[in-house]
Image (cartoon, rainbow, N blue to C red):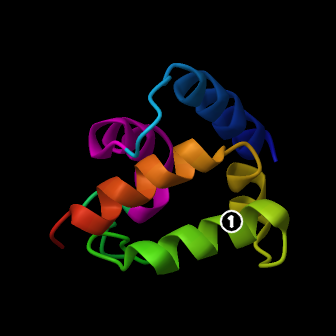
Amino acid sequence: MRAIFCMCLLLTGVLSASNSQAASPYAGHEKAAAVCAQCHGIKSPSADAPFPSLAGWDAPYLTTALKQFRDKSRTSEIMNAIAASLSDEDINDIVSYYSHVKP
């Protein structure tokens, strides 16, 4: 639980630093590196990680999944906590980044 709280604090600081309106893969890279990469990696997670790599995934799928985790219509204790602090802009940036990364 402490790790989730720390991740949320880190996420809040990283996400509040961005003010752009359009989806930015550059901002998405920063956000993904700070938050998502610990479990999902950038191009691939560690070999023994139980979490899928998100590199190259379909943008509409990633957007829907993150929004479902945020509104808790899709449940995962960790992802619901992390996604709860994501704005639509944060989601668009992260999706823009991961959907363009080659696995």
Query: In the image, 103: left or right of 8?
Result: left
Q: Residue at x 77, y 37 (%)?
A: 5
Q: Quadrant of residue 77?
A: bottom right
Identify the residue at horizontal 61%, vertical 34% (top origin).
11
Magenta span contains residue 88? no
Relative to 93, 12 lies left or right: right
Residue 33, visible in the rendered structure: yes
Q: Give the number of callouts.
A: 1
Q: Is residue 87 above or below residue 50?
A: above
Query: Is residue 37 covered in magenta?
Result: yes
Q: Which residues are magenta?
A: 24-40
Q: What is the three-letter code of the residue carrying label 1?
A: Lys
**Magenta span: helix, strand or loop, mainly?**
helix
Q: Position of residue 15 (x, y in %)?
A: 56, 30
Instruction: Examine the rendering and report whether any part of residue 44 can be seen.
Output: no
Front-most of 83 and 52?
A: 83
State the residue position of label 1: 67
